[in-house]
Image: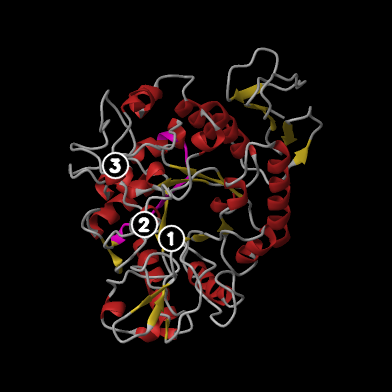
Amino acid sequence: MEWWRHAVIYQVYPRSFADSDGDGVGDLPGITGRLGHLADLGVDALWLSPFYRSPMVDGGYDVSDYRDVDPVFGTLADFDALLAEAHRLGLRVIVDIVPNHTSSRHPWFVEGRRDRYIFRDTPNGWQSLFGGPAWTQVADGQWYLHLFAPEQPDLNWHNPDVRAEFDDILRFWLDRGVDGFRVDVAHGMIKDLAGVTLFDHEDVHEIHRGWRKILDSYPGDRMAVAEVFDTAPARVARYVSVGELHQAFNFDFLEAPWDPAVLRRIIDASLAAASQVGAPPTWVLSNHDRRRHVTRFGGVRRARAAALLMLGLPGSAYLYQGEELGLPEVLDLPDEVRTDPQWVRSGGAELGRDGCRVPLPWSGDAPPFGFGPGGSWLPQPADWAAVTVEAQRKDPHSTLSLYRDALRLRRPSTTLRWLDAPDGVLRFETETMRVAANLTAGPVRIEEPATLLLSSSEMAGELPGDTTAWWGV
């Protein structure tokens, strides 16, 4: 079975993982120095959010050079060292590719290569996902499209030069040894300007079929996972049909409330859509763009239960850095430190995504909690002293220990069968375990003759409220 069909992949947001040089910003050597944490945790791979040259208007998702490392993160030699150490530890490495847009500081845009972007004499009424109009006017009166910030002009994927450039970018990183790509806004590269199609245009699949051929031309099961949001499961499945990409993120699961009926409906729909095209389902609870699920679900107890529910499902799972520590969203950042363009362009009406990007706490009793020899680019809460990696590592009841135990016990599975359960409880079995998740506030009795493997909170004869447990089969 290909590794990506059942992998647990850990997302690293480089600015906030670990800082090696004391400038307060995470970097590639910092990540390399902490890879032992990921190996000890038991994940199969790490996904690196962008580390390319960038003005950092959107945290690195505004790329000015796709073949180099931004100096704030290090050098290409630092990347090669990270990749070599990850492979030595048995970890695969996936890197972000950002094909929908470049930075406005990219040489193409600076040199006026308008044929490679989307310029029009008259804009339509589209709005940016970051707020405000999706069109900005240049000096001669024309307008260019940017679905995100004005500093992120959208590329014209009808131009063969754009397609050839990204084919070459993929090969550049594959030749260096990366194991795959996370494709940012994978459904957004083709636009129907005459109609209303911002995303999920039919012609985008031709691009991904071409990329699949490139990936298949390399040894070692290289893969790609698509970011496809605000799209029905049956449509998302088309991105992972035969001859296209390997995985697609499950945003319905990510955005689901703590509700058993809703979660079961999403699980069923996800499994059905994936099975129709022979792809593995994926599951994710948090990422760099969404409020952390500890806060979204209302506390660590539910977050721990959600983690065991997710990791018990068939397919592949994605973890976001810090969720293994039970980190909450930081909601009270001072206005002056917020940098997210969602915050800036909304005039402060939207908090944006900085709260889930606060640097990780590794050790010690005070900020920056071992993040690096200096400070941290976003302030860390003082009470994070209790949730550092160091504080949790030796505590068998910590959230870190729960994740570590779960990944040690987790085994690949491909099928799910629902079992009878009391109201408010999701109960199922796979080839490797039985799982029961009690999404109610009170305890329920679950009769399981098999051996209890793990539970998200202490059990004494009954399954407590807001708790998930695993049993052997």
Quarter in which the C terminus is drawn: top right
Q: Tell me the distance, in whole angstroms, between the alpha carbons under discs 1 and 3.
A: 21 Å
**Residue 317 point in image, percent of width and height:** 55, 45
User: Which residue is at 29% across, 68% downward?
Assistant: 64
Q: Nearer the viewer, mark 2 or mark 3?
A: 2
Q: Earlier in the sequence, mark 2 or mark 3?
A: 2
* Residue 372 x %, y %: 23, 37
The residue stretch that appears in magenta: 40-52
> Dot 2, how many residues are within 10 Å of its Cα: few (below 14), some (14-19), or many (20+)?
many
SS category of the residue bearing label 1: loop
- In the rendering, which numbered label is found on residue 130? 1
Between 204 and 119, which is closer to the camera in this rendering? 119
Q: Could you say which is closer to the camera, residue 24 or residue 138?
A: 138
Q: Which amino acid, mark 2?
A: Pro
Q: Which residue is mark 2?
A: 341
The image shows a total of numbered marks equal to 3
Q: Quadrant of residue 334?
A: top left
Secondary element at image label 3:
loop
The earlier-in-sequence mark between 2 and 1 is 1
The first of marks 1 and 3 along the sequence is 1
Amino acid marked by disc 1 = Phe
Q: Which residue is mark 3?
A: 378
The colour scheme of the drawn protein is secondary structure
Residue at left 31%, top 72%?
Answer: 104
Residue 393: which quarter of the image? Answer: top left
Query: Can see residue 278?
Result: no
Question: In which quarter of the view is residue 71 placed?
Answer: bottom left
Asked if disc 2 and disc 1 are in contact, CB closer than 8 Å, the reply is yes
Looking at this rendering, what residue extends furthest in the right direction? 420
Foreground mark, 1 or 3, reads 1
Please tell me whether residue 158 is drawn above or below residue 403 in the rendered image: below
